[in-house]
Structures are given as structure tokens and as C-alpha cells.
Amino acid sequence: MTLVPKRAVCQAALLAAAIACSGCTSRISAAPQDVPAVAATRAVRTDLKNDVTLTAELEPYYEVDVMAKEAGYIRHMLVDIGDHVKAGQLICVLEIPELQDDLQRAKADVQTATAEQSAAEQDRKRAVAAEAIAHLSYTRILDVSKREPGLVPLQEVDVAHSRDLEAEAQVASAEQNVQASVSRLQAAKAALEHETALVEYTRIISPLNGVITQRYASDGAMIQAGTSSNTQAMPVVHVAEDGILRLMLPVPEAYVGTVHNGEPVIVTVPALGRTFPGKVTRFADRVQASTRTMTAEVDLKNSKLDLIPGMYAQVQLSLAEAPNAIAVPVSALDSSGNANKVYTVDDRGTVHIRTVITGIQSPQFIQVMSGIQPGEIVILGSHSGLQDDERVQPHFE
């Protein structure tokens, strides 16, 4: 029996262990690689709204430069910048002495024309009375000459007849004088009304409810008549209606078809940190060639006068709405190629590429109108390198 040294036995054991270990390493390297992990989530049902935010400047509903109809000096200026006025409220009074003289002359002309008409009426009455007597005398003489020929000379009959005709002519002339006096009176009254209206123009009133945003003159200032559109006359004040304000929104061409009258909007005023309800009241229905935008107007009631013309406001315009829609995150959509695609993962971890039809889009989600169902797992982020029927490990975010 041959004895083996203990040292040799130990070396042999170590060698066998090394060989066994080497075999294990070979089996590990031959095992399949790990399944890749991908970010994923599930398709859900949610309410989607497609909104666009537009910025515009608050403008008065109406505003106007108040001009003087007649030139004159300002006697009393009754308003100042920031004063709120009502329609018809007196703003200032002009001093125009010549208008008062013209008014008094017009009143005197009316009195004269009235007296002339009265005199013409009296002349007509006298002419009618004289014509009646002349006609009666002629009738009687003519009667007598017919009943008793030769008793009344024919000359007297002719004289009576001529006096009757003369009296008729005087009546006609008196009638014409009356008509002429009536016309003169009407003209005098019209002139008086004209002068009265001009005197009324010395009282400059506000044409609308609003606020005085600018005052151009003070007491004693000479104001020119603003009677022409191209005049260089200076206005007295500028009035802006602030009980209702309007926003002139530049709607981009892509959204023009979604704008409708009466559509509610949310108006945010950053300077106040508040939101106000409004609605689209009118739109131009024409895209401007220079900006490729269409003007739409939003009216805002400002009964408490919290809003000030000139402030900037942001309007959230709702373009489309899809309640209870099937939606996935925007990053789940692959828009490369000719069709939109979504990568889904089944219960076994197998990738399936689905062609989908999309609808409206919000900042976070996009509507999927066909191609997937709620609850299905969809892959997020980059889809490069993923193939149909590939195995993945979804990690939900």
C-alpha cells in the first residue's frame, strides 16, 4: 500500500475545486442576458381640454375726444383727470359773447315777423270786408238795371263792377301778403332755433358714462371749433367708458375655426392676481394678411371698476373638449413615420406596437381615439431600438 503525503492530497483537492469552479463560471456566462427595463404607465380615462392662452390689453368699450362745436373761451372747467362722469353731465362752459348777440337779434326778428303777420292778417280782413261791400253794391245796381232798364245809367253799373273786381284783387294781394308774412315768421323762428342750438353748444357735455382720462384745457383757454375730421383743433377732454371693457384678442390662424360667439373664457389679470369670467362677443371673421391672426373681442363687465384700461390680461381660450377620454402621456406617443404609434406591454412583458388615432392634446396627455384600451401598459420616453414581440421589464412611474 502506497502512502500519499498529506500535502499532495490537499493540492489535489484544491485543483478539483478550481476545476469545479471553472465549470460554474462557464455556465453563468452562457445564461441569457437580463430583460431590459423600460419606463411605463397605464392608459387612463380622463377629461381633456385643449386650451390656448392669448395676451391682450384691456381697452375701454368706447372712448372719444370731446370737441367744441363753436370756438370760444372756457369760462368754467368742471371736471379733471380721473373724474367719473355720466352721459349728459356738464363738463365745461364756453364764453362766446357774439352768440348771445346773434340770439337776441334772432329773437327780435321773430317778434318783428310775428307783428308783420298780424298786420297782414288785419289787412286781409279789411280787404275781404271791402270786397264784400263792393260786390254787394254791384249786385244791387245790376239787379235794378235788369228790372227797370234805363233807370240806372250803364256807366254806374260798369263803375260798380270795376270796384268789385278791384276789391277781389285787393283780397288776393292781402292773401299773398299773409303767406309772405307766415314764411318770414317761419324763417325767423328757424334762425332763432339755430342760434339757440349754437348757444347750447357753449355747454359741453359728456357723450357717455366713463372716466376723464385726459384734460387738455383749463379756465380761460381758447378752444377752436372742431367741426371737421381733419381739423387741428384741440379737444377739451378725453372720455373713456370703463363700466365695460373689451379685449382685442389676436387669434392665430390655426385656431380661427374654433372661435364662436358666446363662448365662455377665463380672463386672468396678472397685475391684480385675479381671474374674471368673460365670453367671446364678436370676431372679425377675417385673417389679417400681415399677422396671420384674426381679431376676436371679449367683453368684461367692470361694475366695481377694479379693472383699469391699459392693463394686460391673459385669456384662456378653450379650443376643444373631450370628457372621459382614453388618454396616455404625451411621451408615450411615437410620431415618427407615417402614422402615430404607441408601444404597449402585455402581461408576459412582450412589446406590441399599436397604430393609433389621436385627438386633442393637453400639456400632459393626448387623447387616443382608437388602438388601445384603458388600463393597458404603455412605454414612455424614447422608443428607439424597441421591436415588436421583444421582451421588456416595465417599471411604472
Image (tube, grey):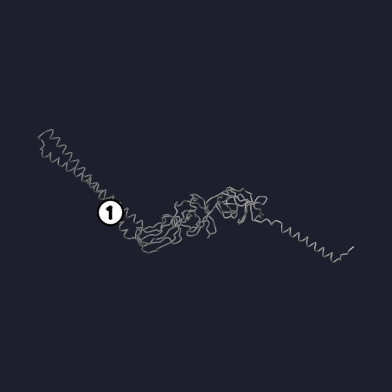
Residue 48, position as x, y percentages in the image: 57, 51
Residue position for label 1: 109
Task: Name which quarter of the figure residue 240 lies in.
Answer: bottom left
Mark count: 1
Q: Looking at this view, is 248 or 168 the one in front?
A: 248
Q: Amino acid at mark 1?
A: Asp
Helix, strand or loop at mark 1: helix
Residue 378 as seen in the image, left or right of residue 178: right
Give the position of the C terminus as an image quadrant. bottom right
Residue 279 as seen in the image, left or right of residue 157: right
Give the position of the N terminus as an image quadrant. bottom right
Task: Name which quarter of the figure residue 22 lies in.
Answer: bottom right
Q: Is residue 138 above or below residue 192?
A: above
Residue 37 as seen in the image, left or right of residue 74: right
Residue 220, position as x, y percentages in the image: 37, 64
Residue furthest to the right: 1
Q: Looking at this view, is 364 or 106 the one in front?
A: 364
Residue furthest to the top: 147
Residue 211, position as x, y percentages in the image: 45, 58
Q: Is residue 124 above or below residue 292?
A: above
Could you classify mark 1 by the number of other residues whose Cα lies within 10 Å: few (under 14), some (14-19), or many (20 or more)?
some
Residue 184 as seen in the image, left or right of residue 158: right
Residue 93, position as x, y percentages in the image: 38, 59
